Amino acid sequence: MGVENTDYREESLDLNNPFDIKLISEFLEPLGFIFESQDVDYSMILYNLNGEVIGTGSYQGRVLKYVAVAPKFREGAAFAQIVTHLIDLVILKHKHIFVYTKPRNLEVFKGLGFTEIATAEPLFSVLEFGYENVKTYQDYLRSVRREISVGDVAAVVVNCNPFTKGHKYLIEKACKENRLVYLFIVEEDRSSFTFDIRWRLIEEELGHIDNLVMVKGGNYVVSGTIFPCYFLKEEKECDIAAKQAELDVITFMHYIVPVLNITRRYVGTEMYSPVTAAYNEAMIKYLPSNGVELKEIPRITNGDEDNYISASKVRAAIREDRLNDVINFLPDSTKNFLLSEESKEIREKIRNTISRH
């Protein structure tokens, strides 16, 4: 009978070395993970003194990924050693660390100092660790909050990649129908148009509206923070999108609504993006039962009643070098930007990619 070692050896992997990739992939596959080396910045392996691989962990940016320990070693200190190793590296660059995991692992991460943000049973939970956290974001919200004594307070969440007349219509409608509107702009720079550009184009067009407050989305409003599909290989894509949407909506309800006293949330109808449609379904499921009225506004069209305005159509037109076909989809700020030399880099980026973003 073998005797389990309690001493472990850590080893950093070379993500450009096919042998190292094979080593980690073959360890993770029986545990339900599909390892994608391009989705991580760093990986490590934990060995026992007999030379067995007993665990692994990786990170990308501020997100821990692929943290796994062989079943017979889960009662020992291996898991804690892997997570501590990763934290020590990530915290040097980021004040804030996230991990997505199965709900059954919640207590293990909590025992290592992580705090649960939200859980979407039965697929996954998201937790955070660090000098900054959701309370830091709530402090930011308090700094931009306006106090009103009467009237409805609405929220609109937009990415605006790029900002279109459809976005403008939705936001202006919310401003006309409510005493105060908080406009959350998705901050994560995973879009063709950077956050700074998106913010600027919206502000140029709508900055004059007195009851509109522009708000940075941070890590808590449709952030995605590198969504962890890698440990959900048995799940249907639609179920994953639905649960990701639930996480975001639950986070919005628990941490944002109470701080800003939001009573309504405005969304546009969705006929193009399955992911956005999943968000809308999650809002229908959660918001009204928690005191937030959901207002779903039909998309506006340009000319033909079936010619719905959408940012994805604008990106497709840029990619195919036919911007003039959608020029009427754009408010002045976006139109002027796209016709300027300043947008050249973004236009080239869109032309050279097949991504939806």
Image (cartoon, rainbow, N blue to C red):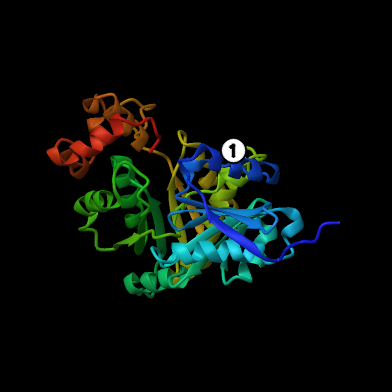
Task: From the viewer's side, name the closer residue of 71 and 127.
Answer: 71
Residue plotted at (73% across, 59% down):
73
Residue at the image point whose x is 60% and y is 70% from the top:
112
Q: Is residue 17 or residue 279 the one in the foreground? A: 17
Which residue of the protein is positioned furthest toward the left in this rendering?
341
Dot 1 falls on a residue whose secondary structure is: helix
Q: Residue 247 occupies which quadrant of the picture?
A: bottom right
Q: Is residue 99 above or below residue 245?
A: below
> Residue 116 at x, y = what percent?
58, 66
Report which residue position mark 1 lands on. 237
**Residue 291 vs residue 235, the one in the foreground:** 235
**What amino acid is at disc 1?**
Glu
Q: Would residue 270 be seen by someone viewing this image from the given angle?
A: yes
Task: Pick the quarter of the image with the N terminus.
Answer: bottom right
Classify 10 Å Cα crowding around label 1: few (below 14), some (14-19), many (20 and above): few
In the picture, measured across the screen, residue 157 lies left or right of residue 237, that is left
Query: Which residue: 21% across, 38% down?
Result: 345
Task: Please state if 241 lies on the left or on the right of 90 as rendered.
Answer: right
Residue furthest front in the image: 50
In the rendered image, which quarter contains the C terminus? top left
Residue 232 in the image: state x and y as whole percent. 63, 44
Q: Position of residue 57 (x, y in %)?
A: 57, 54
Identify which residue is drawn at 36% across, 73% down. 148
Say if residue 310 shows up in the picture.
no
Most foreground residue, 212 or 149: 212
Marker count (numbered): 1
Q: Quadrant of residue 119?
A: bottom right
Residue 147 placement (x, y as % from top left): 35, 75
